[in-house]
Amino acid sequence: MNFTGAHILSISQFQRQDVEQIFSVADRMEPYALRKRVTRVLEGAILGNMFFEASTRTRVSFGSAFNLLGGEVRETAGFESSALVKGESLQDTARVLSGFSDVICMRHPQEGSVADFASASRVPVMNGGDGANEHPTQALLDLYTIGRELQAKGRTIDGLRIAMIGDLRHGRTVHSLSKLLSLYSNIQVMLISPKELALPGAIIEQMRSAGVTVTVSDELNNSIANVDIVYSTRIQEERFTSKAEADLYRGKFRLNQAIYTKHCEPNTVIMHPLPRDSRSDANELDSDLDNNPNLAIFRQTDNGLLIRMALFALVLDVVDKVDDFSREVHWYNSRQQ
Amino acid sequence: MNFTGAHILSISQFQRQDVEQIFSVADRMEPYALRKRVTRVLEGAILGNMFFEASTRTRVSFGSAFNLLGGEVRETAGFESSALVKGESLQDTARVLSGFSDVICMRHPQEGSVADFASASRVPVMNGGDGANEHPTQALLDLYTIGRELQAKGRTIDGLRIAMIGDLRHGRTVHSLSKLLSLYSNIQVMLISPKELALPGAIIEQMRSAGVTVTVSDELNNSIANVDIVYSTRIQEERFTSKAEADLYRGKFRLNQAIYTKHCEPNTVIMHPLPRDSRSDANELDSDLDNNPNLAIFRQTDNGLLIRMALFALVLDVVDKVDDFSREVHWYNSRQQ
Amino acid sequence: MNFTGAHILSISQFQRQDVEQIFSVADRMEPYALRKRVTRVLEGAILGNMFFEASTRTRVSFGSAFNLLGGEVRETAGFESSALVKGESLQDTARVLSGFSDVICMRHPQEGSVADFASASRVPVMNGGDGANEHPTQALLDLYTIGRELQAKGRTIDGLRIAMIGDLRHGRTVHSLSKLLSLYSNIQVMLISPKELALPGAIIEQMRSAGVTVTVSDELNNSIANVDIVYSTRIQEERFTSKAEADLYRGKFRLNQAIYTKHCEPNTVIMHPLPRDSRSDANELDSDLDNNPNLAIFRQTDNGLLIRMALFALVLDVVDKVDDFSREVHWYNSRQQ
């Protein structure tokens, strides 16, 4: 696809070569994210960071990514807008707000809302999450992380063996990642969840017809034995008839260091879309894993910055100018100590 | 008036020559708003964008206008301030916050609050709306839009024929626009509203004594026949004893393409202060007008950016330096495709 | 201490020489705060201004301080974070958010939360206030203000005589200031409060063992007779069994111009951490003092900007580069009129 001026609404937009182009640009953003260099390539450009639903980390990640390219950020955090409350259409909102910026990132609780908004926007729009529907930058950062973790072992995404664990029915990150994986070869996916929270059949079918080997299980320990990546997600208590029932399931899908050591191959990478629940009766990823160097959950969020920088650079067509506007960082850099 | 260092609190501050000066500077801001060029004239300056009442679009418009001149924006969005809740006076708040910026834009639900705040501020203050009282940049952008629309037809504001429709009693935009129009010659104003929502007599008197020809009507179709501009506003349901009664009135003041075609002169310009209610039982401006090139409602919000840039440049005395600090834009510009 | 890369969590971190270093750097920041010059030394750096509790003025002060050094600010204002609500640990939040910025300022209602957050952060963290525990920049700006006010009279902090008035039991600003004063010589502290709201004994003991002369009183007029500084704080009504009881006490601790003239030495400096309650039945510092040139309350907030700039410059190790990246301001500067 031609990224220049494009809306980024759904992972369905991408062919494998598009994903690889994004990842290649993301790699080039790393010196800036690591504060080895600073670039002003987007000095004077404005991001409209329109979060009509609260989300501190995603909002700040998009905003920081734009700042790291030298641009300014105007934003809204949460549903303050009296205009939308008063019955203004999303198209009207889009036409007004798109007059104030060069690119917009939008999050909104309603499925399809971001595409609706984009249809009337006069600048490129990025989907920061529209309800249960899409959150394309999360799927991209997940796959990018998988690629980097494998690359460190001399491997590629082709040939990946991954276990996805937890509420596979409702987790949009898992749905999107499944679709992206279908673009690659020799993928083996192990789906581990309570039967009630199984991945929707349509997504399984789509993966299988793309050549992905899909196995389904409702048991954790043996299913994580032969994978490269364990991708854990939250068991969503609110989906069950009672907390007691949720706890029953939850107990079977918690990962901790003891289970990891006993059942996983050495150096199996552990991922999670975050936030993870730290309360002792709910945690799906125990904090005793925090010193495990294969815990990649914070590398995921770091990589999110690279992916978002890459998308901004691609959409605004400045990829090849980023370095030209750069210089060394001269302040204290905690990332290089 | 001398704009340098001045507070912008009310349209009553302006003589005709002041309005024309603002419009002339606004014209010069257009290449920056259209992203043909970028300027850093206010690099290092800080706008305190203090919105003590939610308003996404006005807040973002002021912030973007300042960013477009190269400045930074610190802001508050909504009534979070525990200080004001704890009984701090607006003057104390002003003296503290004005220590942190070079210019302040303030919105507050209470009439007179912005002038109160400005009286203690150590930097220039712009009124971003103080309850039912004033919203001077809205009135300026409305008149500026009228001027540009007429100019495109080889006309000037002098000689304007305008119909104002809807809740003329409570709409502060209509009040302010009426006052500004009194600065011009040969103005004909047609006021179209339910009798209960008529423009206050004092404003009508003020217009008439300034030489404006004012006609009053409670009927839409024939009243919009001979005007250059139709300025529509919302019928505010909450002002009536029942929704049923409001609907009765509302039905008589809705504009759609069919009515427009049948009753208006060709190329009559349609304006509205926005937001317009898109719900089918409430809309005063039908969405079937959206492809009508004379619908100027989004040109109004675009022009708001120019007006706010102009005011910042005037108040901070950098009008003649804007171009000196400018360069071409080198990223993708959707406005020039 | 070595400031480079350090967390700023508590005034207990500082020795006298550290405090003096901060004050010396703060002095050097003044031309930038007064807009005589502008510096871009932190151009490209990002402050994560994470306020998980509302506080307009402190949040804006930190943000403006960073902007004045040329940096960008990403922020959150209030407890919007669904992640923390969903049970994410502060350490996880810290590890994620610290990936997005070069330095973080954090406020959170829970005591100890900022230190907890800092322990997992990958960038330096500044405490913007953690509940009743610490608010180190407030204590620093208070002492810095005291030093400047005395310096104007050819005096130093050594030898200071100060009266602290009001709710000394709960006011964390008074606690922190008391500890900082213990680093200096020949300090005389007069503590004036209802017995129920006396300064905690441990803090009095700590001051006395550091050589501070501490006197305790529950009467205002005679106790303010021989001091250089009157530091007033709010009587916190909510700590009493009834408003009537609070009013009884409150009446005895209000300062106004008449009491000041009658009881204080000429040029006694009046301070207050703000906000002060302007409601007539609650005000501890009457507005008839507003024209008294010894009222230093707004100099305190102005100085806060200098202290925060100094801390950012120290922690990011750019103190000696600030001037190199500077130039004159060319816009209207209300502070120099």
Image (cartoon, coloured by chain):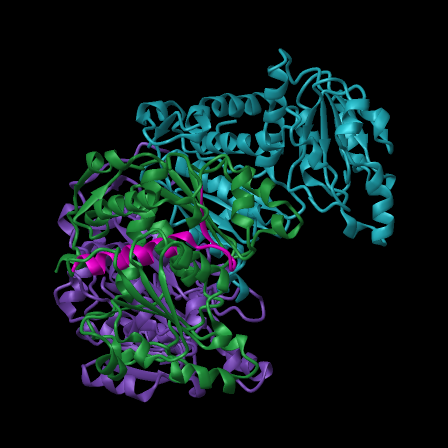
Chain colours: A purple, B green, C cyan
State which quarter of the image contains the N terminus of chain A. bottom left
Give coordinates of residue A201: x percent, y percent: 31, 88
Res C145 quadrant in image: top right
Nearest the viewer among B302 and A72 is B302
State which quarter of the image contains the C terminus of chain A. top left
User: Across the whole image, how many numbered discs are drawn on residues?
Assistant: 0
Residue at (12% x, 60% y) in the render: B337
Residue reaching furthest to the top: C154
Give coordinates of residue B92: x percent, y percent: 60, 40
Give coordinates of residue C237: x percent, y percent: 78, 49
Residue A23 visible in the snapshot: no
Residue B189 visible in the snapshot: yes
Residue at (65% x, 28% y) in the render: C291
Q: Is residue A109 magenta?
A: no
Q: Is residue B139 magenta?
A: yes
Res B222 quadrant in image: bottom left
Q: Is residue B286 above or below residue B301?
A: below
Nearest the viewer among B325 and C140 is B325
The reply, left or right, for residue C22 in relation to residue C198 is left
Q: Which residues are magenta?
A: B125-152
Nearest the viewer among B271 and B196 is B196
